[in-house]
Amino acid sequence: MIEDRKRAHIMKSLLPESQFDIGTGLDLILPIHNALPEINYDSIDTKIKLFGKTFNYPIYISGMTGGFKGAQVINRDLASLASQYNIPLGIGSIRAMIEKPELKETYYVKDYDVFLIANIGGAQLLQYPLNQILDAFNELEADAIAVHLNPAQELIQKEGDLNWEGVLEKIAELSEEVNVVVKEVGSGISGTVAKRLSSTKVKYVDVAGAGGTSWTKIEYLRYPDMPTGFENWGLPTALAIIQSKPYIKVWASGGIRSGIDGAKALMLGAEAFGMAKPFLEAQTQGKLPQLMDTIIWQLKGVMFLTGSKDIEQLKKAPYIVLGWLKDYAP
Ligand SMILES: Cc1cc2nc3c(=O)[nH]c(=O)nc-3n(C[C@H](O)[C@H](O)[C@H](O)COP(=O)(O)O)c2cc1C
């Protein structure tokens, strides 16, 4: 049952075994320290625009949950945080609600003043008529929808969807109707895929690369008898940003674990950075504002130490690329 699966995903994703053994590649970005920044920390401006709307920080909460009872409190806590800090909020796949409309309340957060990004799987676009997806989108009063591409996760799931023929065309159709961001879930979006998506009206690609939560590992935890081998499958986040950026505007996620990681992703050219697991963990510990304040302090710290008074300047701040990533640096 979808509801049991959602609950299991939350529990398993909090285990240390859910994380990649390989890194994001962001440790290979060395920002050039500016010992003479000539800016006032207190006037640093972290505002950005996404979908034409201004947000206070280049940070978003990656889509995670909905569709079972326990999801409601998680989504509401995250919505309260997102509205307090004026950042976008993603929710989990709305497939469960499309199948059972009575599950709407586990996703609905529009009583908070929040920019809401609904979520649906690429494979599900083949399974439900566009109208049904748009009805759920409208019911939730969402502002945008994230289409997640997760073929590696589906491969390990016994009940996984392995027919992906025609998904790009469905994404193109959806992008004619509403604001669309296309994301992975931890295996990353390559330059070739970003280029193919750039032929549609998709506004952003959220690379969701390797280095943080591994959805193949989570599915292996659920199906220990599946043949192993794909635990660390995917493009590290830094590489996915570098590859995708020439073709489409990029959001960075997958293994971002601090405002310093996030700032490096922006230096590589991302418009914003997101996290899933850290927000889930902080929600379970009742520490969401503390997490946000730490991320913001770290982001502003990098801006201060690179002499960047706003996000545009941060994106132009100099850095060196180390190690294997050097071969792929622009
Ligand atoms: C509990 C949990 C549930 C998730 N559910 C979804 C989902 O329904 N749709 C989706 O696009 N991504 C989903 N994700 C993936 C995240 O949005 C994100 O891409 C991925 O976890 C990598 O980010 P991280 O390393 O910061 O966790 C989920 C992640 C977590 C932790």
Image: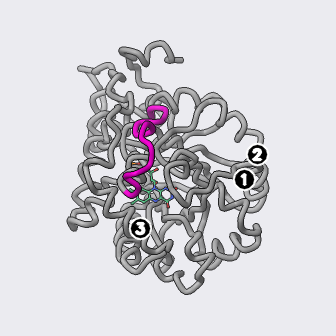
Q: Name the residue that disc number 1 marks.
A: 171
Residue closest to the eye, 42 or 163 = 163
Q: Quadrant of residue 326?
A: top left
**Bounds of the magenta span?**
222-237
Residue 58 seen: no
Q: Which-is-in-front pick, marks 1 and 2?
A: 1
Counting from the top left corner in percent of width and height, residue 66 is at: 47, 71
How packed mark 3 is, by other alpha carbons closer than 10 Å (few <14, some 14-19, many 20 or more), is some
* Mark 3 Cβ and ligand 1 under 8 Å apart: no
Counting from the top left corner in percent of width and height, residue 256 is at: 36, 42
Counting from the top left corner in percent of width and height, residue 257 is at: 31, 43
Magenta stretch contains residue 230: yes
Residue 212 seen: yes
Q: Amino acid at mark 3?
A: Ser
Q: Name the residue that disc number 2 marks.
A: 200
Q: Amino acid at mark 1?
A: Ile
Residue at 23% in and 20% down: 35
Q: Earlier in the sequence, mark 1 or mark 2?
A: 1
Residue at 37% in and 52% down: 224
Residue at 30% in and 33% down: 302
Q: Name the residue that disc number 3 marks.
A: 83
Identify the secondary structure beneath mark 1.
helix
For the C terminus, the quadrant is top right
Residue at 64% in and 75% down: 136
Q: Amino acid at mark 2?
A: Thr
Q: Which-is-in-front pick, marks 2 and 3?
A: 2
Counting from the top left corner in percent of width and height, residue 254 is at: 42, 43
How packed mark 1 is, by other alpha carbons closer than 10 Å (few <14, some 14-19, many 20 or more), is many
| Magenta-colored segment: predominant secondary structure | loop
Position of 139 with respect to 61 (left or right) is: right
Quadrant where ligand 1 appears:
bottom left
Residue closest to the eye, 142 or 126 = 126
